[in-house]
């Protein structure tokens, strides 16, 4: 049985004070058994957030990126081992904002996936098409290529450390959510790809999240889809009430 999984991606938002208060509100809540909640916060807050969330076994801490090297002369960068040393369990990789604004290609993301798995951390791997690709009907082809090029080299046992988030780029931060049918269609395709590439056990046990303008009003319908196991939440993860309502959905 797959768990239910909701991750909040704060992106470059919130002061330290606001972030600590928000994580206190999330950590003091009780969640149903089998629900995994992850707070992906700016690097500089992770150390303290890990202490706050350690009181709640349903809640973990995640980072939003890392470097692909183990250590070395990479001014301004952060290594997976450093994130691990402050209590980080998950790292988001391949987010469309990293692809768009920081030139991350499937090949760079592949190296980052390897670096994170080498440290024994877990990856929340993002994939998704841009509007033009959706309008020309190429969404499945684009997502499959992202999966193949960044994850295709892994074996089934490494895949246990991965969560996949389908995030249509046209839905991120735009208020335009994919319909539950559109989400289910791609999630199903991803599950079939997992089965073809790693076998049916991996396909059945991998969490596939939806991300892109997910909010309390649409979460239940999206999460009710057979292949949607939870969400990666941006804007709506910045308010405790909204985020908790989404987790409850
Ligand atoms: P959004 O962002 O919920 O604000 O659309 C989702 C994401 O980028 O992970």
Image (cartoon, grey):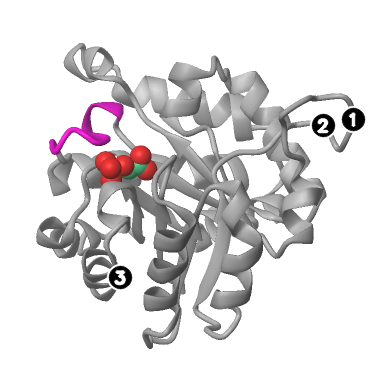
* Residue 127 on image: x %, y %: 43, 33
As for residue 106 lying within the magenta part, the answer is: no
Q: Secondary structure at mark 2?
A: loop
- Regarding ligand 1, which quadrant of the image does it lie in? top left
Q: Is mark 1 within 8 Å of ligand 1?
A: no
Q: In this image, 33 relative to 49: left or right?
A: left
- The residue lying at 23 percent from left, 43 percent from top is 183
Viewer-nearest residue: 119 or 157: 119
Query: Are dots 1 and 3 in contact, CB under 8 Å?
Result: no
Query: Are dots 2 and 3 in contact, CB under 8 Å?
Result: no
Image mark for residue 200: none
* Residue 152 on image: x %, y %: 63, 32
Q: Which residues are magenta?
A: 169-176
- Residue picked out by circle 2: 69
- The residue lying at 30 percent from left, 20 percent from top is 130
- Residue picked out by circle 3: 247
Image quadrant in which you'd find residue 226: bottom left
Q: How many marks are shown on the rendered structure?
A: 3
Q: Secondary structure at mark 1?
A: loop
Lower sequence index among marks 1 and 3: 1
Q: In this image, 206 relative to 188: left or right?
A: right
* Residue 74 on image: x %, y %: 80, 25
Cα distance in 3D space between marks 1 and 3: 39 Å
Query: Are dots 2 and 1 in contact, CB under 8 Å?
Result: yes
Image mark for residue 72: 1
């Amino acid at each position: 049985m797959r768990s239910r999984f909701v991750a909040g991606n704060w992106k470059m938002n919130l002061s330290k004070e606001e972030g600590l208060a928000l994580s206190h509100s999330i950590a003091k809540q009780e969640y149903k058994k089998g629900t995994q909640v992850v707070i992906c916060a700016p690097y500089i807050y992770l150390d303290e957030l890990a202490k706050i969330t350690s009181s709640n076994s349903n809640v973990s801490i995640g980072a939003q990126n890392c470097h692909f090297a183990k250590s070395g002369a990479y001014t301004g960068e952060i290594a997976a081992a450093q994130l691990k040393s402050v209590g980080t369990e998950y790292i988001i990789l391949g987010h469309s904002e990293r692809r768009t604004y920081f030139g991350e290609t499937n090949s760079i993301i592949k190296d980052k996936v390897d670096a994170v798995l080498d440290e024994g951390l877990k990856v929340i791997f993002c994939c998704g098409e841009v509007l033009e690709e959706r309008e020309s009907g190429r969404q499945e082809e684009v997502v499959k290529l992202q999966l193949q090029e960044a994850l295709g080299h892994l074996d089934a046992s490494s895949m246990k450390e991965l969560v996949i988030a389908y995030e249509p780029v046209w839905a991120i931060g735009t208020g335009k959510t994919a319909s539950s049918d559109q989400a289910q269609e791609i999630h199903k395709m991803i599950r079939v790809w997992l089965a073809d590439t790693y076998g049916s056990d991996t396909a059945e046990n991998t969490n596939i999240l939806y991300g892109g303008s997910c909010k309390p009003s649409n979460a239940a319908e999206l999460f009710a889809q057979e292949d949607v196991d939870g969400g990666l939440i941006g804007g709506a993860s910045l308010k405790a009430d909204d985020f908790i309502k989404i987790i409850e959905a």
